[in-house]
Image: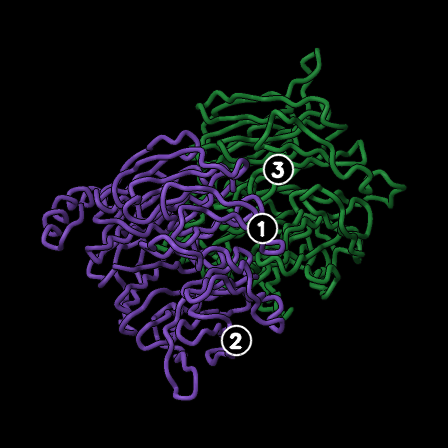
Chain colours: A purple, B green
Amino acid sequence: MRYGRTWLPALVASLGLLLASTATQAGELRGTGDLGVVIEREAGSLVIVEHSNRTTLARVEDLGDFSHASVKFSRDARYAFVFGRDGGLSRIDLLTGTLENRVVQAGNSVGGAISQDGSLVAVSNYEPGGVHVFRADDLGEVARIPAEFGDDGELSRVVGLVDAPGQKFVFSLFEAGEIWVADFSDGDEPDIRRFEDVGKQPYDALITPDGRYYIAGLFGEDGLVLLDLWDLDAGPQRIMDGYGRGEEPLPVFKMPHLEGWAAADGKLFLPAVGRHELLVVDPDGWQEVARIPTHGQPIFAVARPDGRQVWVNFAYPDNDVVQVVDVADLEVAHEIEPGPGVLHMEFTPRGEQVWLSVRDEDRVEVYDPDSMERITSLEAITPSGIFMTWRAHRTGL
Amino acid sequence: MRYGRTWLPALVASLGLLLASTATQAGELRGTGDLGVVIEREAGSLVIVEHSNRTTLARVEDLGDFSHASVKFSRDARYAFVFGRDGGLSRIDLLTGTLENRVVQAGNSVGGAISQDGSLVAVSNYEPGGVHVFRADDLGEVARIPAEFGDDGELSRVVGLVDAPGQKFVFSLFEAGEIWVADFSDGDEPDIRRFEDVGKQPYDALITPDGRYYIAGLFGEDGLVLLDLWDLDAGPQRIMDGYGRGEEPLPVFKMPHLEGWAAADGKLFLPAVGRHELLVVDPDGWQEVARIPTHGQPIFAVARPDGRQVWVNFAYPDNDVVQVVDVADLEVAHEIEPGPGVLHMEFTPRGEQVWLSVRDEDRVEVYDPDSMERITSLEAITPSGIFMTWRAHRTGL
């Protein structure tokens, strides 16, 4: 079942007791290495959680439209930067559980990134198409990069924004079919390098964990485009042509997230678009080496930090099931049914827990990925994305 | 130059002003994702540092013999566990800058590890030979694992202790020539699996970043031994036979640290023993693919987090120089001379800074690894190991 907004006050009230019992922790001295946030999709709020004792610490409300939301963390792992659908950029203090600053910086936004040195926060916008860059400490504006293309100064929607080593941001222009690299290593005026004609309609992108390869998916073509950031002069190259995007397709209920690619055992695991399959890719040559049949259309493929398992969730109507691929055998080894609307999965940094959001039952489930047993369950209002602070220390996350 | 202990009081006094100016920060609310500690070798103390503004926050003294010392962090990145040469295990609160607990748990100790879930701290001992396991929160004893071998109950020195996925500790027995896997997933009574006859005198070991392969160096033979933790039944296998350990050797001034292996661009960079070379190994088949000539006998080979560079320091008398290998070209691209006695190097987690300890000039230098320029310099008393809290979130670190 799904809720309208009318049910919210009652649920917030019922969760109030839970939070009141732990609210005294806000403002106390504590480490921030075991913290995380859970986006509460319909409520436009989030809860701050910790994964040592697996409890909820605080709720932060009135954060706008979270029908799409993502989170980055400050380099000291104290602050969360939350990017909402409505262009809102919020800076949350995880220690005090408060909204410290918020700017509505565009009309329609899909994601953000934080620079290598932690000083800059970038937001990619649909409307107006471009990238806005802010100072991480006070959200003061640093730069606007309008995504102009063609001869008429038209603006393109921007997707697939990531940080990269060398104080760079890399992003793709959907309508323009371009990839841009904005280099802030010389200060607040970026040096921008444009790559045109990379392919039709790049719709999302990822960067490999080492920050070397930027890979964008193409909505308008059956292939991907790759940029080697160690050798920008080589320019973009097409890979995985005919990988399945353009085959006679199943209906696509939801585009998979490319940032959901999992790296494990030297291979990459990629949700096929519209198909009930996970593609296994060898980055040495960028060839497909296997296809793993799955329960539904994969949305996220997330590797356990030790690379032994890849956890996969699915598009509606199969989003009550999660499958676990054994990386050594390249087969589905386990299947669980956490409940309706499993939207996201996040591992603790060393992999002994995996957290799953079960949107339609207002629960976050914590599993032991070795025993496949449920460890505990936390209440949250229509939870979607789960983000933990260990991401502060990884490129592209 | 090297100092005796007589110079210490004067230097501590001269550094007192520096610390006093920042000491008010101790006890204040702050994130712990950008913290680190620097071991002060001769003084038996350490300083707590932060790498956002690159300052020293506090000094903690009276920690015993730090002629060899290593550090692990609690899962919330608030506490440092320091393993001293004299068997001392200290728990330090990074937020308050205080020694919270200390046990002298053996007579001669070389290293430690923290379990996957963060609940257990293990220490490997020479005297008495074995592993002691403590509760991370109060240092209460959990288990003693005497390293008995042969028919007479003789105890072996223990080296190469690491944590591994599945709540395991893995370690090697020098005199016994064995590798043991202690599994604590069922509680405080470990299930121990012994592998005998792995090779003569394993002297140090590492675990790959994904926690899959445990590799021990052999002092008594010219080769390494590998254990695949995904397939323990396959048992240990010899790799890299004839890699140089047993060739007609140069005098070995200091054994390289195996934990100093660097993983970059799908390859491993290994300090050769006694030779002026870095070995490049392809983990697919464990074959040597290149040798890179270096300035001296390498001690640590540390990869920049993006894998684009490997930084190498050297044994005496070449320990005033650091060389930087370009991973794409497999050649030394830069050489710097930070000063006499460069003992250790640590990158910030996303690689925009590298910190170097210059023992004989009581300085820690911070470099920008892109420009190769020095960013700043911090005072510390005979600094050796530098450890940052991002390690809390990685297996084997």
Pointer 2 residue: A195
Same chain, labels 2 and 1: yes
Q: Nearer the viewer, mark 3 or mark 2?
A: 2
Amino acid on which disc 1 is placed: Asp
Q: Secondary structure at mark 3?
A: strand
Q: Residue at x 43, y 48 (%)?
A: A301
How crowded pointer 3 is (Cα within 10 Å; few <14, some 14-19, many 20+) is rated as some
The answer to whether any part of residue A369 appears in the image is: yes
Image coordinates of residue B127 in percent, x first then y, are 65, 26
Pointer 1 residue: A282
Q: Secondary structure at mark 2?
A: strand
Q: Residue at x 47, y 64 (%)?
A: A216
Could you say which is closer to the camera, residue A379 or residue B377? A379
Pointer 3 residue: B213
Amino acid on which disc 3 is placed: Tyr
Q: Residue at x 39, y 71 (%)?
A: A158
Please indicate whether residue B4 sits to the left or right of residue A268 in the image.
right
